[in-house]
Amino acid sequence: DVSSSNDTFIICAVPVDECTAGVFAPVVNVYNKGHARHSLEHRILMHIDSIQPTNGSLYGGMTLTITGSGFARFGLQNQIKLNLNASTMPRGTHDIYDDDWLWEREHVGANGTDGIFDDILCIPRTMKNRACRYSDDDSGLDCDTDIAWAYDGVRITEDAEWFDFSTPTYIECVVESLAKPLPDGVVATLNVTIVNSTTLVDSEALSNSFYTAKLNANCYDLSHCVTHDEDGYDIDWFGSDYEYSGATQVSPVPITFTSALTPVIESIYPLRAMQGQLINIHGRNFKTGAPLTDTNWYMTEFGFYEQPTAAIVTVGTYQCQIKTHNDTLIQCYAVYGDMYTSLDVEASIHGVGNAFSNASFTFALDVKSISPSSGSLAGGTTITLETSTLHNEAAGLGISSFDMWFMEDADYGISQYIANYLGIDQGIVCDPIASLKTTTSLTCVTSAVEDSVWETPFDIGDTALESWLVAEWNYNEIYSECLGDCTFTHLTTKTPVLTLDLEQSQVTFANQTASYAESLNVTWGDVLMFYRDITSDISNDIAFNWSDVTSSDISILLNNESLEFNFTYVDNIIQLAVLINEVVEPCLDESIKVTIEPYGRAVLLLSKSVSVIPVITSISHDYGSMGGGLEVMIQGYGFSESSNVIVGGRPCTDVNLINISALTCLTSTTNNAGYSYEGYKTVSISTSQVMSVCLVPDEYKCCDKIETFNSTTNITTSHNKTRFVHAGCEFQFNDNITHTPHFERITPDHGHYPQNVTIVGEGFAMSGNKVTMGYVDAEVVSENTTHIIVSLPKHVGGTYAMVVDVPDRGFADGDKLWFRFDSGIENISPKLGSRYGGQRITITGYGFAPAGDPPALSSDDVTYSSLFSSWVNYGTANNSDPFDFDAIHATFDTIVATTHFRNMRVVGGDHTMDWMRSLSVDVAQESEGYIGPNAYYYVVASDGDSGIENAFDEDPTTSYDGYGGDLNLGILYQGYSPFILTDYQIVWVTYAREGPAKWRLYGRESSTSTWQLVDSVTEPRTESATWKYVNRTVDNP
């Protein structure tokens, strides 16, 4: 920095904080003249002002902070040595330093050939930025800068491949770890030497070294890096060609190695556990000395973070992630390492150094004990294995799943596990109970020792087996080892044995031919009796100790549901009466499982598998309407919410479960394709895919008179003979008027609330008929067997289905079972308004769609609004001229709206003339009303009555190429089905060129039905025009 100058001198200040020590030739550039000629040199000196700390561990490892000036800017271009008296140094070669890389680099100075070394290195810190990618396949960040100086709190987000912790005034270096401790109180002097000037200024060579070191993905400390070429092959150690022959300086402050500051690990707990276990390291001198300026955080494969400003603990070769740290305790997560191998635990405290440690830790999944240690030959014993810690506290990862086996020799566990994986049964499985797992125990239920136990349990004998466990943790399989008593014994004397006594059992199907002959068929309310006389078992020393058993020890399951039972034990006789109760779902070929705690499963001899069958005991109706709708009650056992009901060979809908013994449903209409309705058809119930068994008596009719002549006695006798009608569980759809009411007509066939209409037919009931019109029930005014008069409900306009429900018969059958609700205007107020729209009007009439939120709604209006919320009112003018409105709010009989002319802004005529148009309101359901690609309609256009085939391409969409080109038609239908078009509106028709003289609308009931003419319209041929809301009524729905 030039402070003053004249013709003969220049005074400037050298920026010491930016300069490296050495001899340099100044470069002087004079403004408007150029470089000065001279042969002068200037020497920049190195100074060491302070060192922190000035004492540390006998094992080295402390991080020193050296302040001063004249240091090399790049840390590893400074060589820092701690010089000791040769007599204090350990003798030997590899046993001096812990890190073999020092020997391989040949950076350790030797004195003579006797292996006596007189210095220790302190290596400047240059660390890889772990956020940066090192290859195109890596997912890290693209870091464009080679190196950043991290002494000023620089974080990992800096865009640099490497972080260097040195400047010309500051060096952080790590004293190398010693394999053997130095004598207590040894004093060393510190010396800093920089590289030669050629290396110091060769920035291109340095940049290339950074790049080749980056290619080594396993290298984090630059001093430890072997550089790689593009193909991944080793080149040499980083800085292997450095010659430290530049400026040098000895620190005036010595470094003392003392036992008083040497960290000591005294004990750790636990000694064995799974990966991720939090371990406690107890000792002394753990308090951090001078902290590092490094704030470089990074993520490992387990998602943990490391903060190297406190301490570094390693278990084996992997860092233990530190949780807490004080002077006497370090808690850290041992995250990874080889299983069942003793791993050294080492620590280095920043600012203090390496700790003395004889501690070790073993990653293990230990089985310590089993409780209980014995149980039934039939399995079912719930056992708990005490284990080493199962939870990874570091990442919250625990055992995600585990499998357990019992085998003769657990040493063959892995081979048997592989065999089992390949489908070869090996060992006896113990089924895990995941909900009972703790951080130090696993619980499972044993399996039967052999399949033959269910037939000949006493032929097997006692069997002792070893336990073996394989657990999945963090997508890795971990195998257990036994650390204690791991043997479980299947004992004959702990195996309960019972026999099924069918004679003493109460079974519904005992005298019935059931559908599932391979199993024992039962239903709800049946009682199965199991017993055993253990007198002979006692004499043979194989008896189970029933005297210790109480009812609370026994549990009985069928299809995963608990059964009620009664247990007695008197005079060596055991009786167990089991009730098939209502909670059991129907099932096929299930086993009854009797478990006695704490022993396990009981063996049930001479017992088939059990099928729980739903039964039907009564059906309320034998006959019903062809139109369906008859409510049928079915009684029996084994019904549920999921039961599928068939009545008359067809699905019965709207199933209402009263309880497990009764339900009701509505018969279906016979109009669906694919069914035959002649004669009687099945009534059945399927629950859980198990079909019911019918216990309803068959129907017979009495009586046919039979006469018999006896030729011997010449006497004629007569008697009555019953005739079979139908099986007990059958139903017939019968079109006889006594069973199927018939609809003939409704008069009138259109109207609106509150008018009355008359439904004419036959087979109606004298009372109780129910009429549903569209979406609303109509009030019945009067009724008899041939006429029903109803008051029309409030309903939106349009044509909708109608249902006549006759009590105890079902729905009436007939043609054209629909009704058209009218919609129309009775008054508009006011009748005069601006030709530019914006006039608020009130329209009164009937059949309008609800809209908005009208004030003071009645309960009927609220119901009406919720029913028809998806319908929309359309306002249209006569002669197809636009005169639309925006509904503010609307009810059945009132619309409050504002007028608009959005479709004709320029209103024809002189402004002094009135422009009068009349208004109509049409109603349609927008969400369902548009004819789309799935509706069976098409349009043809022609010049008159010929040429219709020119336009029809049988593409059922709403846009067509018609006669004359580009005829587009949009239709909004009004009706209750896409296949019954009763009223519709032409939403728009566009003639791009000359329009056709006639267009026709065809429709059909299905994709294979015959096309029928629905409607035709004849219009004059005009130039391009657009119609909007042309209303049509169809004569051929």
Image (tube, rainbow, N blue to C red):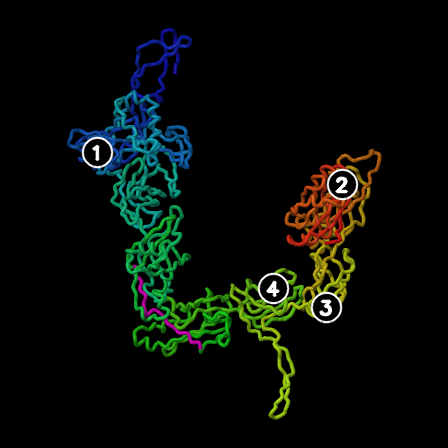
Q: Is residue 993 above or below residue 149?
A: below
Provide residue 373's location: percent of width, then percent of height. 32, 63
> Which of the labelled discs sits on residue 186, or is there none?
1
Q: CA distance from mark 2 to mark 4?
A: 51 Å
Q: Nearer the viewer, mark 1 or mark 4?
A: 4
Residue type at mark 2 is: Pro
Query: Comparing marks 3 and 2, which lies closer to the viewer?
Result: 3
Mark 1 nearby-residue class (10 Å; few <14, some 14–19, many ≥20) = some
Separation of marks 4 and 3 at Cα, in angstroms: 23 Å
Q: Quadrant of the C terminus?
A: bottom right
Estimate the x, y position of residue 716 in percent, counting from the top left.
64, 89
Q: Quadrant of residue 484?
A: bottom left
Closer to the chain start, of discs 1 and 4, is: 1
10 Å crowding of disc 2: few (<14), some (14-19), many (20+): many
Front residue (pair 929, 385): 929
The image quadrant that residue 649 belongs to is: bottom right
> Residue under circle 4?
652
Looking at the rendered structure, the secondary structure element under dot 4 is loop
| Residue to which mark 3 is pinned | 763
Write the start and end of the magenta stretch as one range. Answer: 486-502
Labels in figure, total: 4
Q: Report x, y in % for residue 957.
A: 65, 46
For label 2, the residue is: 882
Given the image, on which type of amino acid does mark 1 rest?
Val
Type of amino acid under label 3: Gly
Q: Is residue 441 in sight in this rendering?
A: no
Horizontal relation, residue 422 to residue 580: left or right:
left
Q: CA distance from mark 3 to mark 1?
A: 119 Å
- Pointer 3 with pointer 1, Cβ within 8 A: no
Q: CA distance from mark 3 to mark 2?
A: 50 Å
Mark 3 crowd level (few <14, some 14–19, many ≥20, 10 Å Cα): many
**Magenta highlight on residue 845:** no
